[in-house]
Amino acid sequence: DAEITQSPRHKITETGRQVTLACHQTWNHNNMFWYRQDLGHGLRLIHYSYGVQDTNKGEVSDGYSVSRSNTEDLPLTLESAASSQTSVYFCASSESSSNTEAFFGQGTRLTVV
Amino acid sequence: AQKITQTQPGMFVQEKEAVTLDCTYDTSDPSYGLFWYKQPSSGEMIFLIYQGSYDQQNATEGRYSLNFQKARKSANLVISASQLGDSAMYFCAMRELPYSGAGSYQLTFGKGTKLSVIP
């Protein structure tokens, strides 16, 4: 079965360190997204990609970067982790169709100390 | 202005009763889609139901139905015959499709409603 997986599921890191969260999907979807979930804010879009070599900034992109070198993967990098980036991060993918849902990974809980 | 507004941070419903979760949206695009997701305490995001802006009938999926009132820009989720397993966070989301036709596939989410089902 096709799926979308995130790793690690939990991570604790120190302020100032670079951190990369992995996202891998086997749906063969062109579209991939990174969201962060914080209490009282719902899910907010960080970055998204509509295909290989395509990346775009979302609503809360400061301090984050992504790269898309193949269809399956969209790693999210925190250049210099800050306590404000403590959050639950979700990766998602979807077809290029208006009426199909996005499929989500299990989430990564990141704590910056 | 928020694009998706969910005005109920938390709600309680008696088991076997129906419950309506409110969602209003704001867009000037002629074409858009509305989605509802469920997030149980385990954390995964589960797709429930979809409504397109041009759909004439309200969407239904089992015990879930979407009360779509386009003129009022509302897309309320109705859960019939609530079960204990329905206790979760529920998120309304929108995908806008600009008139220009340029692809725009990201979802914008509301802040969610926490539903608690009481036995």
Image: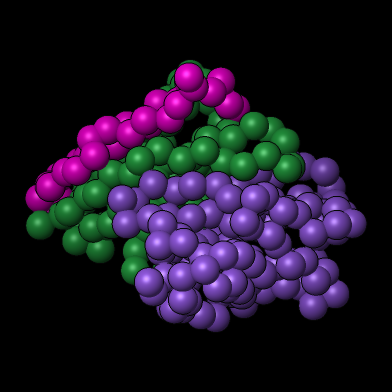
Chain colours: A green, B purple
- Residue B24 is drawn in which quadrant? bottom right
Q: Residue A106 in the image: x percent, y percent?
A: 35, 41
Residues A52 and B108: in front is B108
Residues A56 and B89: in front is B89
The residue that appears at 85% across and 57% down in the rendered structure is B57
Q: Quadrant of the N terminus of chain B?
A: bottom right
Residues A93 and A55: in front is A93
In the image, the segment drawn in magenta is A1-30
| Residue A9 lies within the magenta run | yes
| Residue B30 lies within the magenta run | no
Q: Quadrant of the C terminus of chain B?
A: bottom left
The residue that appears at 54% across and 23% down in the rendered structure is A27
Q: Is residue A83 above or below residue B11?
A: above
Answer left or right for B76 relative to B32: left
Residue A55 visible to an observer of this rendering: no
Answer left or right for A76 relative to A58: left
The residue that appears at 82% across and 69% down in the rendered structure is B70
Q: Is residue B12 above or below residue A73?
A: below
> How many numbered tags mark residues here?
0
Q: Residue B2 in the image: x percent, y percent?
A: 59, 74
Residue B18 visible to an observer of this rendering: yes
The residue that appears at 45% across and 26% down in the rendered structure is A3
Residues B21 and B110: in front is B21
- Residue A62 is drawn in which quadrant? bottom left
Q: Residue B10 in the image: x percent, y percent?
A: 43, 78
Q: Residue A103 in the image: x percent, y percent?
A: 52, 38
